[in-house]
Image (tube, grey):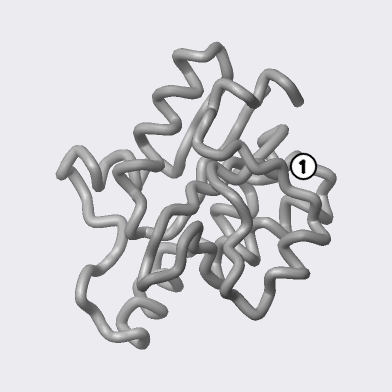
Amino acid sequence: MKIYVLGSNSFVHKMVECKNKLRVLGYDGWIHQDYEDHVLGEKRAFLQNASAEENAEYKKTHDYIRIHYKHILESDAILIVNLEKRGIENYIGGNCLMEMSQAYVNNKKIFLLNDIPQNVPYYEEIKAMDPVCLRGKLEDISLF
């Protein structure tokens, strides 16, 4: 199974770690090469401490939304790495919500590393996409 790893830029190190663990578990885990390069210190995949406008421009310049969509289509499933961010446990932001919906409408399996975040206004939308919550146990993917 080919599993594309996504998540908030704040979780990029954990995303690469999860991609590597998926491979150890025998899956074709993969991630956008820019994120892997970012963790290795070879490239900046996003701007830290930038304004929303600067980050939006950076995402447009690097065409991340379209590239992620293409990678989702090339995969059997996605894994959303959702950790705590800004006081929200199991955070899923706007980009991940879009990526989940892209996977959903293309009949891709959706895995969440942790549970669905409770304190977000789009809880019901996430739940409606029927994601599999792994509760931190990547090895449980084999059960699905």
Classify the position of the C terminus by image quarter. top right
Question: What is the count of numbered marks?
Answer: 1
Q: Is residue 43 left or right of residue 21?
A: left
Callout 1 crowding tier (Cα within 10 Å): few <14, some 14–19, many ≥20: some
Q: Is residue 76 left or right of residue 13?
A: right
Q: Position of residue 40 (x, y in %)?
A: 19, 38
**Among all residues in the image, which is located at the extreme left?**
41
Q: Where is 82 relative to 144, above or below?
A: below
Classify the position of the N terminus by image quarter. top right
Which residue is rendered at x = 67% and y = 35% of the image? 75
Which residue is rendered at x = 52% and y = 27% of the image? 29
Which residue is rendered at x = 63% and y = 65% of the image? 97
Q: Position of residue 30 (x, y in %)?
A: 49, 32
Q: Position of residue 99 (x, y in %)?
A: 63, 58
Q: Is residue 54 left or right of residue 142?
A: left
Which residue is rendered at x = 82% and y = 49% of the image? 106
Q: Is residue 94 left or right of residue 133?
A: left
Task: Tell which of 115 and 32 is nearer to you.
Answer: 115
Q: Position of residue 2 (x, y in %)?
A: 63, 27
- Residue pointed to by mark 1: 108
Q: Tag 1's secondary structure? A: loop
Task: Tell which of 14 and 68 is nearer to you.
Answer: 14
Q: Amino acid at mark 1?
A: Lys
Q: Where is 47 relative to 72, above or below?
A: below
Using the rendered view, name the quadrant where residue 50 is placed: bottom left
Using the rendered view, name the quadrant where residue 66 is placed: bottom right
